[in-house]
Amino acid sequence: MVLAELGGSISRAIQQMSNATIIDEKALNECLNEITRALLQSDVQFKLVRDMQTNIKKIVNLDDLAAGHNKRRIIQQAIFNELCKMLDPGKPSFIPKKGKTSVVMFVGLQGSGKTTTCTKYAYYHQKKGWKPALVCADTFRAGAFDQLKQNATKAKIPFYGSYMESDPVKIAEEGVERFKKENCDLIIVDTSGRHKQEAALFEEMRQVAEATKPDLVIFVMDSSIGQAAFDQAQAFKQSVAVGAVIVTKMDGHAKGGGALSAVAATKSPVIFIGTGEHMDEFEVFDVKPFVSRLLGMGDLSGFMDKIQEVVPMDQQPELLQMLSEGTFTLRIMYEQFQNLLKMGPIGQVFSMLPGFSSELMPKGREKESQAKIKRYMTMMDSMTNEELDSTNPKLMNESRMMRIARGSGRPLRDVMEMLDEYKRLAKVWSKMKGLKIPKKGEMSKV
Ligand code: GDP
């Protein structure tokens, strides 16, 4: 079950239970069984799911459910808390600091996206003013050095590796030494990908760690490996001191459960997720916003970060002001479409808002969605200022709609569809009312 579906299944199970006339143990059990099934299908390890079920039963008080009106909220909150607990084993073992030399070693299975992730991690920090450097200690996979070199060159990040030297320990040691001398503050060591049965490769990994004395070891895991995640992660943890996890390939058909299981196995937090093959398809991972999104509860803090990235600086205060007022005009919708079309995978922004992801921007259909948004904008180009700025839902009568249809050369039903979409988004937008507007530089803490 892909991640987006998991959220849907859980929400449906809760909805079904809260619709029941009598909420007794049986109804609660049915709901929890449904959720268990969804989690198992998403590859969360069985033991974790069972523990979670037991915990929720302990927390949720049936009497409260029977009497209160907020059954849905109570259960949703309990599940939210449990999932957060599962995903949040605390801070990474080490947090690198800008300006102070840190060595970070990447480990993971071959094909997990480790080499790609090394560059993404370096690039992410470089954009924030760090001086990263990449060392390729993967002498096992032919082409690994070329790949790293290519990525590093593209991102203008210094790199070290060798076509001739076959001893990864030597390369790692030399590379780290060199970049220490060059005052790089984030020295990233990419190691050979390996499978947990390959004892020799595990030994090599231990030796690289011994030689380079990394401050932090990051375990890179492909989100689609499923139930195997727990065992793999544990095998790595037993060989080197894994201090953080990065989950790759969370785009497309990612199952999120493996990530939950890996966290449980390594007792290390996920710090970033990879959301595509490109260098900038890489996001800081925060437990609460992630679980909120998973359960379809929206992710306002991620949304704020994205606004900061996408919306021009001078328009940000205005947009946030409008958000906090909860007013949504067709002009605002137009401007937001404009902003969203400026960035690549615009689904990223939408998926952070409750209600946006599934309908306007279904996963895998971004191209169609972009075309639809452009169509909507063409129709809005035929609107008057009064129509664009109105907050009166009754203004858009039939004759106005016919005029817009004629003006934009689109059938009337398209205009109606666009206005329906506007109403739907206005409803979502209205949920933002009262949003606390962050001070400058404080966006990510909202
Ligand atoms: P390594 O063997 O672990 O070093 O893996 P690579 O870095 O060579 O990556 C294996 C494949 O996964 C490559 O085709 C990457 O482009 C791809 N990849 C890595 N991260 C992501 C991601 O977050 N999303 C997607 N869709 N592909 C990724």
Image (tube, rainbow, N blue to C red):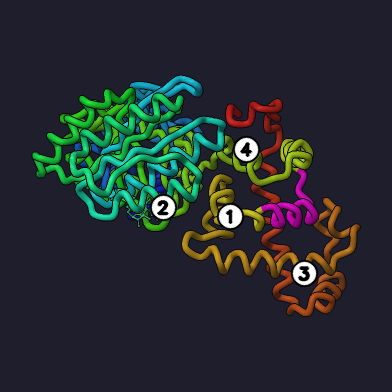
- Secondary structure found at label 1: loop
- Asked if residue 59 is among those painted magenta in the image, a careful observer would answer no
Q: Which residue is mark 4?
A: 304
| Residue at the outermost front position | 164
> Which corner quadrant holds the N terminus?
bottom left
Q: Residue at x 77, y 42 (%)?
A: 315
Three-letter amino acid code of the residue under disc 1: Ile
Say whether residue 213 is left or right of residue 15: left
Which image quarter: residue 385?
Answer: bottom right
Distance from disc 1 to disc 4, alpha carbons, whole Å, reads 14 Å
Q: Position of residue 319 (x, y in %)?
A: 75, 41
Between 362 and 149, the one nearer to me in the picture:
149
Q: Which residue is mark 1?
A: 346
> Closer to the N terminus: mark 1 or mark 3?
1
Three-letter amino acid code of the residue under disc 2: Gln
Q: Is residue 18 above or below residue 277?
A: above
Q: Which residue is mark 2?
A: 150
Asked whether mark 3 and ligand 1 are closer than 8 Å, the reply comes as no
Q: Residue at x 50, y 21 (%)?
A: 99
Asked whether mark 2 and ligand 1 are closer than 8 Å, the reply comes as no
Q: Residue 379: give its label.
A: 3
